[in-house]
């Protein structure tokens, strides 16, 4: 095992890895994908064994939290095999193993996930209205996701709902969503829509609902108490005095919290992105495949972390989109 932890040029320790295990998905959310997406050829994907080796190398370098994402991670074939295997690090280097999912497959997998030591899941849910859900996800069915969320809760998993704030779409559900989460005991985080990838015909600026406005509207009804809690990401949290529920705001656009960033991302083809909002990347698949020994791989990881940038350049000001990324969120993993 390596000893020196990963520290980037801005003295930020890298302790959190997000891994996209597939670019495929059973939904086509309008802000995330075009309806007819070109997916990667299967041979380009890292195998589950390669993903395991890669995650294990990062854990050896000091990563303590692992989030599995996608695309939809739970549609990758045999994904539970991967979860079971990587869970061996829990309590032995790894503090937390978790995932971000659209919830469609949680009915099948929630109990197994809980059994191997997953404690929390993030489920993306932008609306509680069946027709609107079908509209925004194109291919999704709300009842299936609600069953998945119920299965997660029944299995003892803590659920955090992630809702993308979409102007003219879920503005009218702000309180419905908030109150439902409070009643169910789920945490809730709102996310500003980010300029990631060509989504075919949709206009980002039309979708953008600044969380400063969303928060002000919440504050008209509830007393929001700022929490000091930080996770090293772009989220800030409040507690609602009336219900004691926790609400997060992920505001990459209206605020920039890159200074405390502790995370990097790996795509399903083994590209390491040091920042979600920058193009620079490092290929880890070649060193991974070049030798069964991890020396080349860890060298490549260290070299990449040494050029982690200070932050992203997303900006929607002046009615134009700056810092737009050509890749989709499903590629890097949200
Ligand atoms: N399929 C899983 C899901 O939906 O949770 C995991 C991958 S998805 C890319 C991860 C998160 O990214 C979701 O919460 C989704 O709402 C969010 N997302 C996708 N595209 C986005 C965008 N352009 N701006 C902001 N969030 C986005
Ligand atoms: Fe799929 Fe998640 Fe993207 Fe929706 S946000 S299309 S569920 S990857």
Image (cartoon, helix red, strand yellow):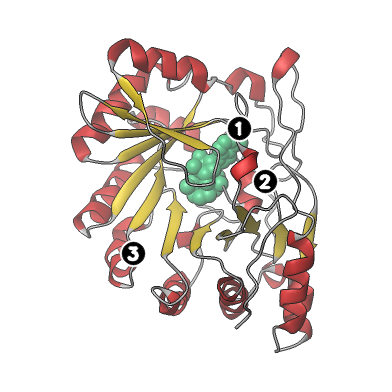
Q: Is mark 3 within 8 Å of ligand 1?
A: no
Residue found 40% across the figure and 73% down from its top: 90
Q: Is mark 2 within 8 Å of ligand 1?
A: no
Q: Residue furthest bottom?
A: 292
The residue tagged 1 is 252
Task: First in sequence, mark 2 or 1: give its number.
Answer: 1
| Disc 2 versus disc 3: nearer the observer | 2
Viewer-closest of 204 and 144:
204
Q: Is mark 1 within 8 Å of ligand 1?
A: no
Secondary structure state at the residue bearing disc 1:
loop
Name the spot of residue 73 as percent of width and height, x first: 50, 59
Name the spot of residue 190 as percent of width and height, x first: 45, 31
Name the spot of residue 218 as percent of width and height, x first: 36, 17
Please state the total of marks drawn on the protein image: 3
The residue tagged 2 is 276
Task: First in sequence, mark 1 or 3: give its number.
Answer: 3
> Taking 204 as reference, is 290 above or below it?
below
Name the spot of residue 201 as percent of width and height, x first: 69, 27
The residue tagged 3 is 109
Task: First in sequence, mark 2 or 3: give its number.
Answer: 3
Side of 212 where 95 appears, left or right: left
Mark 2–mark 1 Cα distance, whole angstroms, equals 10 Å
Residue contact between numbered discs 2 and 1, judged by CB atoms under 8 Å:
yes
> Taking 47 as reference, is 23 above or below it?
above
Secondary structure state at the residue bearing disc 2:
loop
**Picture quadrant where residue 285 is located:** bottom right
Mark 1–mark 3 Cα distance, whole angstroms, equals 31 Å
Q: Residues within 10 Å of mark 3 (few under 14, many from 20)?
A: some
Residue 34 in sight: no
**Picture quadrant where residue 112 is located:** bottom left
Secondary structure state at the residue bearing disc 3:
helix
Residue found 77% across the figure and 71% down from its top: 300
């Amino acid at each position: 095992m390596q000893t020196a932890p990963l520290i980037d040029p801005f003295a930020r320790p890298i302790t959190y890895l997000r891994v996209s295990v597939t670019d495929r998905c059973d939904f086509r959310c309008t802000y995330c994908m075009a309806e007819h997406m070109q997916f990667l050829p299967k041979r380009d994907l890292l195998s589950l064994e390669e993903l395991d080796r890669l995650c294990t190398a990062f854990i050896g370098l000091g990563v303590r939290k692992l989030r599995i994402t996608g695309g939809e991670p739970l549609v990758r074939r045999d994904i539970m095999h991967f979860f079971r295997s990587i869970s061996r690090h829990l309590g032995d280097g790894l503090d937390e193993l978790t995932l971000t999912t659209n919830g469609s497959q949680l009915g099948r997998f929630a109990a197994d996930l809980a059994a191997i030591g997953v404690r929390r899941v993030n489920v993306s849910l932008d609306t509680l209205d069946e027709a609107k859900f079908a509209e925004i996800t194109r291919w999704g069915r709300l009842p299936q996701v609600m069953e998945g969320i119920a299965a997660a809760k029944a299995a003892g998993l803590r659920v955090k709902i992630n809702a993308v704030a979409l102007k003219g779409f879920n503005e009218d559900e702000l309180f419905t969503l908030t109150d439902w989460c409070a009643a169910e005991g789920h945490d809730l985080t709102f996310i500003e829509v980010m300029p990631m990838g060509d989504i075919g015909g949709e206009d980002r600026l039309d979708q953008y609902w600044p969380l400063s406005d969303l928060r002000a509207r919440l504050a008209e009804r509830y007393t929001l108490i700022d929490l000091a809690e930080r996770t090293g990401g772009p989220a800030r949290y409040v507690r609602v005095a009336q219900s004691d529920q926790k609400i997060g705001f992920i505001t990459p656009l209206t605020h920039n919290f890159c200074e405390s960033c502790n995370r990097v991302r790996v795509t399903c083809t083994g590209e390491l992105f040091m920042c979600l909002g920058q193009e620079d990347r490092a290929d880890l698949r070649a060193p991974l495949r070049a030798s069964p020994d991890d020396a080349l791989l860890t060298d490549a990881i260290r070299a990449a972390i040494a050029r982690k940038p200070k932050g992203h350049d997303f900006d929607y000001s002046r009615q134009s989109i700056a810092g737009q990324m050509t890749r989709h969120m499903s590629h890097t993993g949200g």
